[in-house]
Image: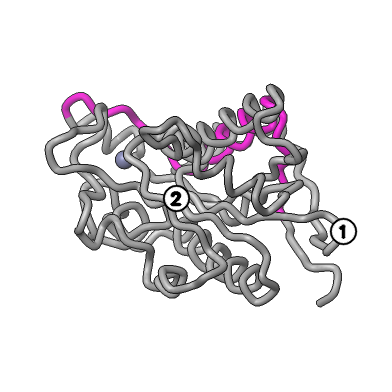
Amino acid sequence: MGSNSNTIDFLKKDLPVEQGSLVLSQDVKTGLVLVDVVNGFCTVGAGNLAPVQPNKQISDMVEESARLARLFCDKNWPVFAFLDTHHPDIPEPPYPPHCIAGTDEAKLVPELKWLENEPNATLRCKDCIDGFLGSIDKDGSNMFVDWIKNNQIKAILVVGICTDICVLDFVCSTLSARNRRFLTPLEDVIVYSRACATYDLPVHVAKNIDGALAHPQDLMHHIGLYMAKGRGARIVSEVSFADI
Ligand SMILES: [Zn+2]
């Protein structure tokens, strides 16, 4: 633990991520994007990729995501939620089976279950890491692109799990698509650090699991934010609303 926090201190000095604060207002049409806030990644003991014990970074992410989703829906601002969902016969290497369609793992966490019946929310099951690719249907249409255009969204606020995996890949693809003018009028992709989380697989645990890649939580969360910022996302650690 001691060496781990030293590493993080060094890393934060060498790879600093400056974080701003965001004040949301009616002036900039903003949509909330929730990435995989499902039981399979967030609920203790729910499955192969769920936390094995209560985890503060993950529970804080769930709480803050749910709070924002409620505020956005109260204002009728658009909300888009990705749900990692896999066919039982189609694996997703390098990961063990997770979030199989029809199981509780692939469902939103209890704090966000109400979104299933919320007319303001668009839910998208995806069977890959990158939600932008996971939004493409057989006819070539893209549900996420349509959501941006139909709602004339100028900024998206991205939250969820994992900071350095599904959140990062979605952010990178979205930024490339924006730069190619596929997402007009979208301008800003904003990652809210306190409402993002990643999983924890410390080195001393990983080395006893055959083939496992170590994944220290605080470090990888930080690296995820750093990479997203490097690709052109804005990173914020505070979000407030201009009129409340
Ligand atoms: Zn998956």
Residue 148 spot, x, y in % from top left: 64, 46
Horizontal arrangement in the rendering, residue 227 relative to residue 88 (left or right): right
Residue 139 spot, x, y in % from top left: 40, 33
Q: Is residue 138 above or below residue 112?
A: above
Task: Give the quadrant of the N terminus.
Answer: top left
Q: Is residue 9 above or below residue 33?
A: above
Which residue matches tag 1? 27
Q: Quadrant of ligand 1?
A: top left
How crowded is the residue under tag 1: few (<14 C-alpha within 10 Å), some, or many (20+)? few
The answer to which quarter of the image holds residue 214 is top left
Looking at the image, which residue is at 76% across and 40% down? 185
Which residue matches tag 2? 82
Horizontal arrangement in the rendering, residue 106 relative to residue 177 (left or right): left
**Amino acid at dot 1:** Asp
Q: Does the magenta portion include 3?
A: no
Q: Which residues are magenta?
A: 210-237
Residue 226 spot, x, y in % from top left: 64, 31
The answer to which quarter of the image holds residue 31 is bottom right
Front position in the image: 98 or 179: 179
Horizontal arrangement in the rendering, residue 242 relative to residue 139 (left or right): right
Q: Does the magenta portion include 212?
A: yes
Instruction: Kindly indicate whether the residue at mark 2 contacts the one at mark 1 (C-beta within 8 angstroms).
Output: no
**Amino acid at dot 2:** Phe
